[in-house]
Image (cartoon, grey):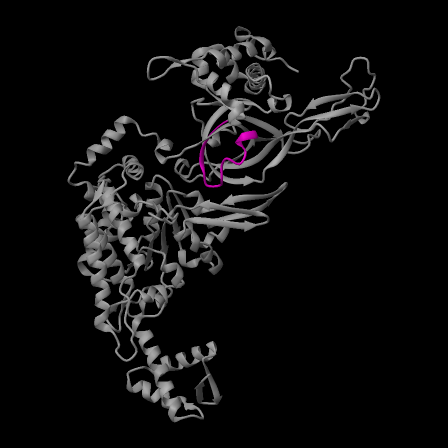
Amino acid sequence: MIMVSQIIEPGLALSDEEIKNEFKNFLLNFSTTDEKGKPYFPYLNILEAMFDRRIRSISISYPDLALYNPRLAKLLLDNPREVLKIFATALQETIKDLHPEIPENILRRYRVRIKDIGGEVPIRNLFLSDYVGKIVEFRALIVRTTQVKQFLRRALYVCDVCGRIFPFESQEFYVKPRTCPYPDCSNTSPGKIRLLSEGQEFEEYQELVVQELPEELPAGKLPESCAVIVYGDLVDKVRPGDRVKITGIVLTEPERKLIEGRRPLYRTYVEAIYIDKAETEEEELKLSEEEIQRILSLKNDPDLERKIYESIAPSIYGLDTIKRAIAAQLFGGVPKIYPDGTRVRGDIHILLIGDPGTAKSQLLKYVANLAPRAIYTSGKGASAAGLTAAVIRTEDGWALEAGVLVLADKGIACIDEFDKMREDDRRAIHEALEQQTVSIAKAGIVATLNARTSVLAAANPKYGRYYPNRGLKDNIDLPPPILSRFDLIFIIKDVPSGDRDRELAEHVLSMHSKYRNPVPSIPPDLFKKLVLYAREHVTPRLSKKAIEKLKEFYLEMRRSAGRYQTDSLEMHPIPITPRHLEALVRLTEAHARMLLKEVADERDAEFAIQLMAESLRQVAYDVESEVIDVSSIYTGETFTQRSRYMIVLDIIRRLQNEYSEGVPISEVVKRCEAKGIPREFVMQVIQKEKMRGELYEKRPGYILFT
């Protein structure tokens, strides 16, 4: 074994025994002061309780070690692998002194973990040769986790020559002992040394694949990923989609067997020695006290709301209502968990349906860059697995890999070309949109991943342009169950208008000629931190006046349905549903959060009502009956269509009393046309009911109910 003192600079030289003794001294004697000013021994307290609490490692803060013993801290940075092995031996001996009753095989499982190294390194820099063999700290996104396996740490071997048994420890790769360790044995042949099945000691082993955080990705670059290996109590601590800070040692292994005449290429990976899961978004961006004060000063700005709207895509002309909705989406409502365990989402989903050239994609791209945590993808290039999660085959088995909605957890997923997705792919995101989880049950892996994500989607009309007289179902190629999960749906129409066209042309041309360069009222960096702070620290609750205003709007909309009731068929439109009421609450809370208020008042409720009313007016308006009917979103059929459908069936039932041998279709068409129902619609109803088995054709041109 190479001693640490042989591979470090002479000024720092310490023998392995000295390193061990100095680390023991650190564990037992390092102290701080508690709130009462008395000495407090943090690591000694952990050591005394480790065995009772079933803790398998002790996490050492690097600044503590550097403060107590700078030379030991420098040795750790220079040669982390060897020094950590000595630290582990020192820890085991110290625990043995404190707890003599611990068996040796349990004692060998205790590990030393180092945290707070400082000087975070971007993932793409880990592949530089300067970091090989060094200890580093970096932030990453977990994209894949493999099944947990058992790593053979220590095994017993028997020598066939002398018959004696001896232990042998595995390091990174399995190596069989070459000779018998006893001096009086002449065995030098590995073939005469056998592995025993008894006395084997295992440690948990798992492989992770981590990726650069989307917000840290340089413009135009593909995200770099890196393999990370974890052992022991670090196993199974993270799931795909988690954002973590990893402290580890950069190592290499040959890509293939080294053969003369071929390039000696090595693959880089990281052996993790500590993983810290950031519990809050604020921990990731680390807001300074000065930044927090700057954010709080905005609370008293009477123009804060206007500035927020002006800071969202100022280069895009118009779309004021949509920008207000996106502002609400960025800040989000307050998620709630009821006493019975039911979780109600606080995230707001928005769908934009628009004619070509109306800046939908540009808006999505801007939001993806502006939000503190966001991922942009295109529906055409995203599969079901790419959006939710997948179980993929690896060399050693199966691994769980996260998709966009999981990776954007607690952020925004911007999905362009939403209508171009395959039907199977759209079906896979139903659960993620409402329950905000992604469930996987494949290849023996059963898991539920968090997808607490707001979705901002953009789609094109079915026929290239949106035709107002056709209704939502005929204009877009999306199924009603998907449409119903969006809180707000907006139509962006490209309609020629003299004044608006002039202003738009001036805006675009002045942008290109550099006469005008719109600057966001709030700089993007500060805007991100404002959103971050509000989502983390502001949890508004509805005031009584806000509740009353929302209730009044909801009841008034419901009452309006009675005015259009069809007496004979007991049919009426559905102007609003309880699902929309929950969306109103989310929008109200989001507006209060935007203004950093702890209580949502009437003004916030009015904001929510205006957005909801505009959205319903655009997508739920029944052109023929001139009423708002959300059933067209939920079922794909408008109030007029449902009424006509029931009238056709009612006419067939009445005629069946007159024509017992079969109702003539020509007579049905004649009576329906008298009520203003076109022949094409009547034939569609008859065909649909025949497909359902409710009607049958006794002879050509004559129908009866089954």
In depth, the one of 501 and 687 nearer the eye is: 687
**Image coordinates for residue 304, horizontal then vertical, percent:** 19, 40
In depth, the one of 459 and 647 nearer the eye is: 647
In depth, the one of 558 and 519 nearer the eye is: 558
Q: Is residue 131 visible?
A: no
528 magenta-colored: no
**Picture quadrant where residue 525 is located:** top left
244 magenta-colored: yes
Q: Residue at x 51, y 26 (%)?
A: 53
Position of residue 358 relative to residue 218, above or below, is below
Q: Is residue 481 visible?
A: yes
Question: Where does the magenta region start and end?
Answer: 232-247
Name, please, the residue furthest toward the left. 302
**Image coordinates for residue 365, horizontal then vertical, percent:** 35, 46
**Image coordinates for residue 635, horizontal then vertical, percent:** 37, 67
Name, please, the residue furthest toward the top. 11
Position of residue 543 relative to residue 256, above or below, is below
Q: Residue at x 40, y 55 (%)?
A: 417
Q: Number of numbered discs present?
A: 0
Q: Is residue 166 left or right of residue 576?
A: right
**Image coordinates for residue 74, horizontal then vertical, percent:** 49, 14
Q: Is residue 500 left or right of residue 240?
A: left
**Picture quadrant where residue 82 is located:** top right
Q: Is residue 607 left or right of residue 582?
A: left
Q: Quadrant of the N terminus?
A: top right
